[in-house]
Image: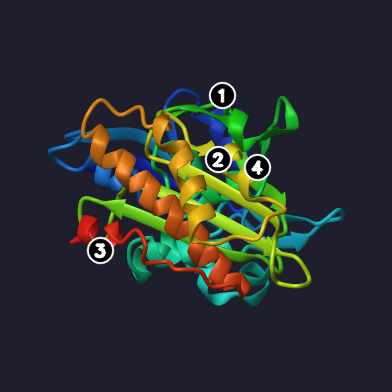
Amino acid sequence: MLSCDLYLMPETLEEAFDLFEAHDGSYRIVAGATDILPWARDGRAGDVHYPVLVDISRIPDLTGFRELTGGRVRLGAATPFQRFLTEDALKRHLPVMPHVAVWFADDQIRESATLGGNIVNASPAADGTPPVIALNGTMELASREGGVRRMPITEFVTGPGRTQIAKGELLVAIECDSAAGYGAAFEKVGHRRSLVISTVCVAALVKLDAAMATVEDIRLSLAGVGPVPVRLAECEALLKGRAPDAALVEQAASLPVDRVQSRTRQAYRREVVRNFVYRGIADALADAGLAIDRDATPLKEAANG
């Protein structure tokens, strides 16, 4: 059970920083609270009490979206996952995120759960981190003392439950590449199909050349096989500039199996990785307009069954 003495909802960043200072050492930041509530229920963390919970979900600066120069976009960290399914601009510039959101629990949880909260939670299998890695995401952090600083998401997440966020600091926005015109896919497997929590997940983005025959650009990221999600640069290098077919994609999908660092079920996880990378690439290619045989590795249904 989760309890608190005060539940505070600032409406500006300045109000939030005031509360952080006033309750120094006794507060916990929440947005959707969809991670902390399951963690605090009996049987996992037991009874958890915080003197103060600071809910940042009402701060407008944390929910906006705008296009930047240089093919980049800026997304407020408290953006709920449901918006990736309903807002045209988000679907156009971040085409992988609707695929992530579909897998992300149910409508009620998607309305509350935020992308920034999912990243800050730093689960090795967090759904939101691989697509942001594939989009070359940069974390924008703000504090009263230090102002604003930025760092790549690959540096921000340092291990299970660990990030570079400092005392009194807040993740306010995520800047990343626009992937307008890319095909996209997201593959995920967990212990159960409904409200599934990942054990392995893959984000894929593919851009084809004008002739729709070769891979002009490809972005792949994998989570759930080690302490932090990773970019699959070796797969990208093999496929970029080439005409993909099932054999080439199968070759690429076999490259990252040695990244599995789990101490349990290694053989299973390696097979899941191979199959899911294959399917992620195949589905992203199909979404971009080039179909290959996506059923050459039919593990996903069996794994989720």
- The image shows residue 159, relative to residue 214, as above or below, that is above
Q: Residues within 10 Å of mark 1 (few under 14, many from 20)?
A: few
Q: 293 or 34, which lies in front?
A: 293
Mark number displayed over residue 301: 3
**Pointer 2 and pointer 1: residues touching (CB < 8 Å)?**
no
Query: Upstream in the sequence, badge 1 or badge 4?
Result: 1
Depicted 130 relative to depicted 68: above or below = above
Label 1: which residue? 167
Whether tag 4 and tag 3 are in contact, CB under 8 A, the answer is no
Position of the C terminus by quadrant: bottom left
Residue at the image point whose x is 26% and y is 33% from the top: 266
**Amino acid at circle 3:** Glu
Q: Earlier in the sequence, mark 2 or mark 3?
A: 2
Give residue 289's mark.
none
Identified by mark 2, the residue type is: Leu
In the displayed image of the protein, which residue is found farthest to the right? 69
Q: Amino acid at mark 1?
A: Lys
Q: Is residue 48 left or right of residue 27?
A: left
Work out whether mark 2 precedes mark 4 in sequence or the reverse, and give the earlier one.
2
In-image side of 2 versus 285 (left or right)? left
Tell me where residue 56 appears, x and y as whole percent: 53, 49
Label 4 crowd bin: few (<14), some (14–19), many (20+), radius 10 Å = some
Which mark is nearer the camera, 1 or 4?
4
The image shows residue 95 at horizontal and vertical percentages of 60, 66
> What is the x, y in percent for residue 253?
46, 47
Q: Is residue 212 visible?
A: yes
* Mark with earlier residue (2, 1): 1
Which residue is labeled 4 in the image? Answer: 237
Of the numbered discs 4 and 3, the one sitting upstream in the chain is 4
Question: What residue sits right under mark 2 in the picture?
Answer: 232
At a point 21% along the width and 50% down the height, the residue shown is 191
Element assignment for label 3: helix
